[in-house]
Image (cartoon, rainbow, N blue to C red):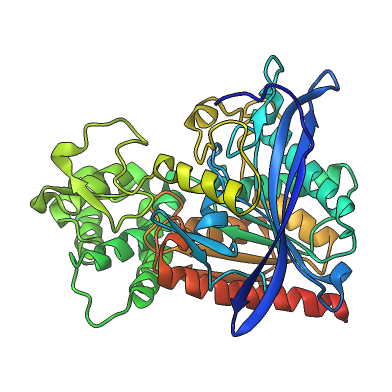
Amino acid sequence: MVPRAAASAKVVTTRHTITLAGKRIAYRAIVTETPMAGTDGTPAAVVVTYAYVAETPANPANRPVLFIFNGGPGASSSPLHMTGIGPRRLDGTRIEDNPHSLLDVADLVFIDPVGTGASMPIAGKDATPFFSVGGDARATAQVIDGWKKANGRTTAPTIVVGESYGTMRALAMLNEAMKAKQALPDGVVLLALALGGGGSPATDAMVQLPTLSAVAWYHNTIDRGGRTVAQQFEAARAFAESAYITATVQGSALPDAERQAMAARMAPLIGLPAETIAKDGIAIDKDGFMLGLLAAKGLRTGQLDARMTRAIADSNFHPPFDDPSMSLGSGTTATIESYLKDELGYAVPSPYRSLNLGINFKWDYEAGRGGAYSGGSFAPFLASAMAAKPTMRVFTGGGYFDLTTPVEAGIFALNQAGVPVDRRSSHFYPTGHSIGEDDAGLASLSTDLRAFVAGIAAARRM
């Protein structure tokens, strides 16, 4: 992480066109630097946003705006920006128009949190407060509020989009907004839900089991019986929420005969031998599954995307570097920097950081302090916000093959927090953690998000 020499508040605007769904759209790309005050009141960091605003829509002040960030913590917005729903898409070393962008239905603002992308601390200043749950959430909310005011969009339907840790950031922002009695967004999009907390070992095993079954289905280590991955997932979920949870809650008190019988029922669902399951325990260890599912072939699965594999003999790194599906983003840095400079007219003052694991390792989760972020699930923040704003809608999306944030875990957390089912839509995709990295998954996500945004816009017009 290379600090900036000094604070700056540059705004760079360029003009472009794209054709989406057969319609030619003229748009402005606006790169904005926002100085962020530190504890002494002077700028301690600069946050950079990348906005795409359609030219002359019928009602520009009322056009929906999506504020978008990824997770980590320590991840820039580049995955959703450059391989997700931005107007231009990174394909290897090429940049091309993205047919799955949402620019035809909403304006898009991508945010690089402090320490990621082009958003860097200022040399000699203390940026530590930005590397905490609360500090990060407040800073992101400040950036969004400032952008809306500067661009005349204070009345626009607002939708916050977060992926992975970004879902925690989004819900922490709701909590901070309620504490400060500030306006809440019209919609929240949560992708690859990572909502914090966690349940008991029994419920954690329950919500993981459907994903294990989907992964086994993909690698053909179970009898598919003509089922699609969605059907396999649902069958495993029904089992997990009935017979399986009844057994797992007993823990070590489960009689041996019942444990053996349960292992025999699990084997055809998750692809591990019944003997292994019975021996290691019916609450399956994620690492044991990744190393065991394809052990006969000398392979292990990925965690972010369990479709990917690597030879077990090569898995001699420490987590998270041992995940065959993990990309550190360094291979795309030069292309992103060129795009920002050549197309958007913005030269980054220091190397673009797609992923900054240094932030991840030192992140302050504010646990154990008795405060709002002291270790529990963030889902109750969403429930409270939806109670405070009855028109708020929620979209959730996750990949069947994501072992890092199993899709059912997020749904379970929302259910337990009392998030209204009639005001949220849940979507499942045949992808790993990053839905946008899969062409078919991105196409489906784009279609689903387009409908979600249109629904929020229509509700505001009523």
The N terminus lies in quadrant: top right
**Towards the viewer: 27 or 61:** 27
Residue 239 percent coordinates (x, y): 36, 68
Whether residue 278 is visible here, answered yes or no, is: no
**Towards the viewer: 57 or 376:** 57
Report the residue that reaches farthest toward the top. Answer: 124
Residue lying at 29% horizontally and 59% vertically, measured from the top left:
307
Relative to 111, is 280 on the left or the right?
left
Residue 375 percent coordinates (x, y): 61, 36
Residue 145 percent coordinates (x, y): 84, 48
In terms of image quadrants, where is residue 41? top right
The C terminus lies in quadrant: bottom right
Residue lying at 72% horizontally and 78% vertically, measured from the top left:
454
Residue 434 percent coordinates (x, y): 46, 56
Report the residue that reaches farthest toward the bottom. Answer: 22
Whether residue 197 is visible here, answered yes or no, is: yes
Q: Is residue 182 above or below residue 217?
A: above
Q: What number of labels is visible?
A: 0
Relative to 231, is 32 on the left or the right?
right
